[in-house]
Image (tube, helix red, strand yellow):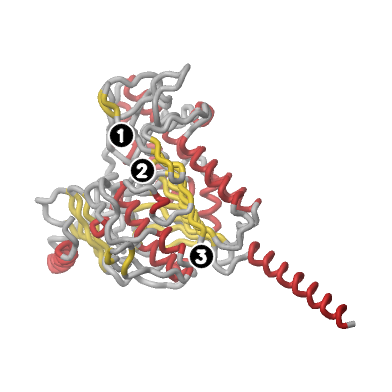
């Protein structure tokens, strides 16, 4: 009888612990986190933000969660990604002007989330000098640099033509690539079906399979290069948009603005800003045809990114991690007016041998209804879509006008996970978190931002506090003043009408700048 009792107790223990283990795998107390970052994506370039581009998976996340209308990056790729990664301004971590040195006086999301027991994964673009596996990430696959050829970021492969790369003939820029601890300079993939967007996703899917039985939660940073130039896409994706853009800039922009209003994303306070593109009918036929081709490829790149996000969502469900995962989607700056010209590229727009940029006119459409583009501190350069999806936690079909910034992700994840944000790390004093947690916003609480926000990139400067924003492009120019609560598209400059408020914000900006480290 004694032995029977022991046996019963042992069996009970195994059953209970098995159930607990199964329950932990199915629904860990801490949520999984997926942060997806697009590259040079305009505010209106996905369906649930007004676009005609087919993005059913992002639309599903947007409809099933919360869409932000006033969330911000820094107007440029690498400072934005440095802010997102560290929770401090690029001016505080050494990435304000270039990305040639390691991050300084800062910790990464990987380093911080490890303290909360997270598996840390990163696939995609870095735009920095350090291999992410040395900065808190268990796994890394991707482009360590800023932009590359989508079909082949390396050298010419046997039987193929020379891939288009930046630089003059005989002096092409080599793009660094990492697979975990191994760095490649250059990286020439053997796979003939290679396309960066697809392979960034493939590695993420493989990791979700590899770690599916772990009890610990995971953090996945999926950092796409799409739709940053070069404009390159698979022919079948381009074919979906054949003749879609024949009517030109004006009709597409107006259709997007109308859709934004119909979706409830914006209201009448969002006045459509003055267009800066050329008159479509006055363009020469050859130029108009090239503009049509560029937009067809650009749309195809976004479409392909969405297809891959769909694969990610399917994999989450397959491994039983879909119900307790917070998914966030952003872009690192507005649509880009930058133009890259290469002397020796050739072939059709969209192919491996041709490096093509979107250009200012379509970028004006991409940033509907805002002004300007990437590199500007006006809303067209810094306002990013933010989709936040978390089943059972974030209310479906919800919108938020909370004024947020990439620096807020660190504070959000620390509150969400109970992770430790250090005072010192790797023998460096760590800059305190600069952002505010978005968790109350996600949970539907009506909170207002307490901290001011600041921007400075090249010729652009801006500051925000309590609905008011100062901004300029040109360091010798005076600041303009806008009330974003009543004029979110920056159409009415109040600097002359309200000089005291303009001066108050300028003094805040100058005080912020004076307190920055000298890199």
Query: Residue 40, which numbered label?
Result: 2
Image: 206 above or below 403: above
State how far apart marks 3 and 1 are (Cα).
44 Å
Residue 314 placement (x, y as % from top left): 62, 48
Which residue is most to the bottom? Answer: 2
Read off the residue under disc 1. 359
Q: Residues within 10 Å of mark 1 (few under 14, many from 20)?
A: some
Residue 8 placement (x, y as % from top left): 83, 76
461 to the left or right of 397? left
Residue at 29% in and 45% down: 374
Looking at the rendered structure, the secondary structure element under dot 1 is loop
Quadrant showing the N terminus: bottom right
Proximity of marks 2 and 3: CB atoms separated by less than 8 Å:
no
Residue 249: tell me if it is visible.
no
Which numbered mark, 2 or 1, is in the foreground of this view? 2
- Residue 24 occupies which quadrant of the picture? bottom right
Which one is nearer the viewer's eye here, 270 or 411? 411
Proximity of marks 3 and 1: CB atoms separated by less than 8 Å:
no
Query: Residue 255, which numbered label?
Result: none
Which one is nearer the viewer's eye here, 32 or 39? 32
Residue at 48% in and 46% down: 47
Residue 334: tell me if it is visible.
yes
Which one is nearer the viewer's eye here, 14 or 46? 14
Query: Residue 117, which numbered label?
Result: 3
């Amino acid at each position: 009888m004694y032995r029977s009792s022991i046996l019963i107790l042992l069996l009970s223990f195994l059953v209970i612990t098995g159930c607990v283990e199964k329950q932990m795998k199915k629904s860990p107390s801490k949520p999984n986190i997926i942060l997806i970052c697009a590259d040079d994506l305009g505010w209106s370039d996905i369906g649930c933000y007004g676009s005609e581009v087919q993005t059913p998976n992002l639309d599903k996340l947007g409809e099933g969660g919360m869409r932000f209308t006033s969330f911000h990056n820094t107007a440029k790729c690498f400072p934005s990604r440095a802010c997102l990664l560290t929770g401090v301004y690029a001016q505080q971590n050494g990435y304000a002007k270039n990305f040639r040195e390691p991050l300084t006086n800062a910790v990464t999301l990987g380093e911080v989330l490890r303290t909360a027991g997270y598996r840390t994964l990163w696939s995609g673009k870095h735009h920095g000098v350090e291999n992410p596996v040395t900065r808190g990430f268990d796994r890394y696959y991707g482009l360590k640099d800023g932009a590359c050829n989508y079909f082949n970021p390396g050298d010419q492969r046997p039987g193929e033509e020379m891939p288009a790369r930046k630089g003059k003939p005989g002096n092409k820029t080599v793009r660094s690539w990492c697979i975990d601890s191994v760095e490649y300079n250059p990286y020439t993939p053997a796979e003939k079906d290679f396309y960066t967007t697809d392979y960034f996703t493939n590695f993420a899917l493989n990791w979700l399979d590899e770690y599916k039985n772990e009890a610990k939660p995971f953090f996945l940073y999926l950092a796409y290069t799409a739709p940053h130039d070069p404009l390159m896409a698979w022919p079948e994706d381009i074919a979906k948009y054949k003749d879609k853009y024949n009517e030109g800039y004006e009709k597409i922009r107006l259709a997007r603005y109308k859709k934004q209003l119909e979706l409830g994303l914006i209201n009448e306070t969002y006045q459509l800003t003055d267009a800066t593109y050329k008159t479509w009918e006055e363009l020469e036929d050859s130029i108009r045809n090239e503009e049509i081709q560029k937009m067809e490829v650009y749309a195809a790149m976004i479409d392909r990114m969405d297809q891959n996000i769909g694969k990610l969502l399917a994999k989450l469900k397959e491994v039983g991690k879909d119900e307790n995962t917070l998914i966030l989607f952003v872009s690192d700056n507005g649509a880009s007016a930058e133009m890259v010209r290469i002397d020796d590229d050739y072939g059709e727009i969209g192919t491996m041998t041709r490096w093509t940029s979107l250009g200012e006119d379509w970028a004006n459409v991409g940033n509907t209804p805002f002004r300007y583009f990437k590199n500007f501190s006006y809303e067209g350069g810094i306002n990013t879509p933010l989709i936040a999806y978390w089943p059972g936690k974030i209310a479906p079909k919800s919108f938020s006008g909370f004024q947020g910034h990439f620096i807020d992700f660190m504070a959000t994840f620390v509150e969400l996970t109970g992770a430790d944000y250090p005072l010192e790390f790797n023998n460096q004093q760590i800059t305190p978190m600069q952002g505010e947690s978005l968790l109350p916003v996600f949970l539907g609480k009506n909170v207002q931002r307490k901290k001011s926000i600041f921007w400075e990139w090249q010729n652009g400067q801006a500051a925000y506090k309590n609905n008011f924003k100062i901004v300029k492009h040109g360091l010798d120019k005076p600041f303009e003043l806008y009330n974003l609560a009543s004029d979110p598209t920056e159409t009415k400059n109040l600097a002359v009408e309200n000089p005291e408020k303009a001066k108050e914000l300028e003094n805040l900006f100058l005080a912020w700048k004076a307190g920055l480290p000298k890199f």
